[in-house]
């Protein structure tokens, strides 16, 4: 399980979420105001907490998503922003609202961070809230991007099971499999993973039915 923030030292936290940061050729990338050579320092400040972190996050979004545009450095920085949100539930309140404020609630990058926050919420023990957040995300993705968001649907099915409704989780996985086979094909890794999940939950259901009988 991902450790929650209060159990991770500042130095360990930085090493966990910013691993590989200095391996990116930031000086060769650009953002809205020029060279992206300042991005590593801003990302480190964003993970430091306090007012400095909030200011750094605002600076990052201003540079990387200026007026809703995507810069060459954006793709390199988003994974680190996602990990900051994933590893720091206490800081997600600053990361996510800034993302919504700058790029908009319907921006794909906002959806990525929302998905990470939902997963972390569940990993830290609040499965019901993770399910609620995943369902809300799925509705927004369907509205903005159209259907067939298989990863989010899989998360919804998984959190449904974690919340104690195995029968509904199995139904959701079965519906997901039909759409994955239609769109991705029967041999796609995601389709195969869903098929494995269905086999597992079918076995669990049959075992529970046998015990009940």
Image: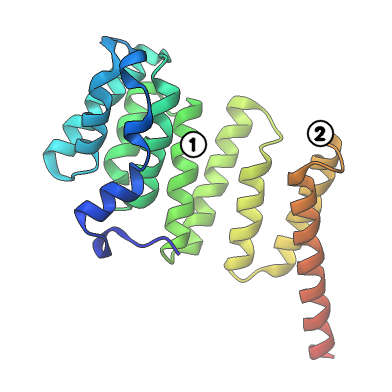
Label whose residue precedes the other's in the sequence (1 or 2): 1
Image coordinates for residue 90, horizontal then vertical, percent: 27, 52
Residue 183's disc number: 2
Q: Relative to 4, is 50 on the left or the right?
A: left
The picture quadrant where one finds residue 63 is top left
Image coordinates for residue 19, horizontal then vertical, percent: 36, 43
- Asked if the residues shown at circle 1 and circle 2 are in contact, with their CB atoms under 8 angstroms apart, the answer is no
Question: Looking at the figure, which quarter contains the N terminus?
Answer: bottom left
Determine whether 129 is above or below 66 in the image. below
Question: Looking at the figure, which quarter contains the C terminus?
Answer: bottom right
Name which residue lies at 66% across and 47% down.
153
Name which residue lies at 41% across and 39% down.
82
Q: Which residue is mark 1?
A: 112
Determine whether 192 is above or below 35 in the image. below
Q: Relative to 143, is 54 on the left or the right?
A: left
Q: Nearer the viewer, residue 23 or 73?
A: 23
Disc 1 secondary structure class: helix
Q: How is the image coloured?
A: rainbow
Name which residue lies at 45% across and 41% down.
114
How far apart in space, not on screen, are marks 1 and 2 (Cα)? 21 Å
Q: Relative to 52, is 110 on the left or the right?
A: right
Image coordinates for residue 16, horizontal then vertical, percent: 34, 50
């Amino acid at each position: 399980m991902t450790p929650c923030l209060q159990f991770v030292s500042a130095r360990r936290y930085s090493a966990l979420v910013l691993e590989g940061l200095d391996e990116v050729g930031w000086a060769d990338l650009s953002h809205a105001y020029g060279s992206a050579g300042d991005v590593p320092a801003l990302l480190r400040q964003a993970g430091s907490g306090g007012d400095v972190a909030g200011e750094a996050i605002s600076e990052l979004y201003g540079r990387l998503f200026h007026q809703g545009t995507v810069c060459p450095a954006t793709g390199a920085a988003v994974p680190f922003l996602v990990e900051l949100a994933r590893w720091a539930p206490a800081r997600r309140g600053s990361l996510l609202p800034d993302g919504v404020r700058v790029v908009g609630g319907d921006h794909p990058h906002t959806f990525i961070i929302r998905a990470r926050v939902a997963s972390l919420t569940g990993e830290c023990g609040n499965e019901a809230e993770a399910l609620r957040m995943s369902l809300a995300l799925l509705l927004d993705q369907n509205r903005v991007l159209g259907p067939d968001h298989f990863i989010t649907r899989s998360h919804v099915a998984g959190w449904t099971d974690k919340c104690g409704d195995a029968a509904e989780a199995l139904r959701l996985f079965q519906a997901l499999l039909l759409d994955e086979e239609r769109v991705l094909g029967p041999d796609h890794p995601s389709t195969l993973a869903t098929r494995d999940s269905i086999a597992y939950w079918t076995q669990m259901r049959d075992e529970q039915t046998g015990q009940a009988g």
